[in-house]
Image (spheres, coloured by chain):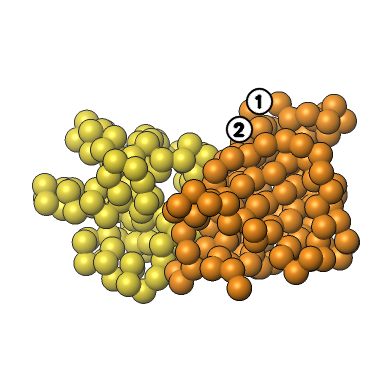
Amino acid sequence: MRVMIVDDSASMRMIVRRTLKQAGYDDWEVCEAVDGVDALDKVDDYDPHLIFCDWNMPNMNGIDVLRNLRARENAVKFGFVTTESTPEMRALAKEAGANFLIAKPFTAQSFSSAVGAVLGR
Amino acid sequence: MSAYCTPTEAGLDGMLAMVVGEAAKASPNEGATIQASHHAVFIDRDGVPVATCSCNLTAAANLGCALSMIPPGGAEAMIEERALSETANANFYEVMNIFSSLLMDDRSGHLRLSEVGAGAAPVPLEDGRSTSFTLDLDRYGKGGEIVFRHV
């Protein structure tokens, strides 16, 4: 299983990695991207099965990353990991093609629930 | 009344669970002051300071170490030496960055972390602008104190 973590904060990328391990996904291969532009640069070569993406980032925000991927007919499973968790944001994410949204602060259980649902596990 | 949020015990617990682990807990601080060693300043969109977060040395060292899982012994050594390592300092900055969301919600103004620095200073807790907690950071132990203040 290949996953990509997209966040401009190195600490948040580290916390997401650690939380994935705590949630039991410790054998997953992880690639990191520092913002939306970096994610789009890497996504074709890395070909992830699942992307965890922050919403607010410099250069290109998460919703634009998702829209760009879907416009390219890339159907990768995509979830936001973000403090932006209002009903409006959730609706916007769903409309753009997101599979899930994990609100910060999160726990290993948050990841298990979201990932389990999207992967059917 | 401030345009920003007052951090709650539940909110801080959630952040600590994410940064340190789910056994980490915050409790309201009943003291009158904390002897702070590290301070973060948060600014609004115009660059005006609107809030601060100060920690005593125990909290700063433990949070700085916990983020990248530096062993508790490392934090203890920093407390004894009264100085954070470069990594712990950088981690502490990141923790303050993460904690900035405790001061915001969907209806509040937007703020961001401007600077983090070290400097011993007593911070009063009973001036009506402060919200303080004691921290139990699981394997890093107790003794940490943190105070958020609206400017």
Q: Are the residues under marks 2 and 1 on the same chain?
A: yes
Name the residue that disc number 1 marks: B86
Is A110 placed above or below B97 here?
A: below
User: From the viewer's perspective, is residue A89 above or below residue B111?
Assistant: below
- What residue is at 57 percent from the left and 61 percent from the top? B103
Decide: marks 2, 1 in contact (CB < 8 A)? yes
Q: Residue at x 40, y 43 (%)?
A: A7
The chain identifier of the residue carrying mark 2 reads B
Please tell me which residue lies in front, A25 or A16: A16
Q: Is residue B2 left or right of residue A37?
A: right
Chain shown yellow: that is: A
Please give left or right for residue B63 compared with residue A62 in the image.
right
Q: Quadrant of residue B29?
A: bottom right
Which chain gets the orange colouring? B
Whole-percent x, y for residue A68 in the image: 17, 48
Q: Secondary structure at mark 1?
A: helix
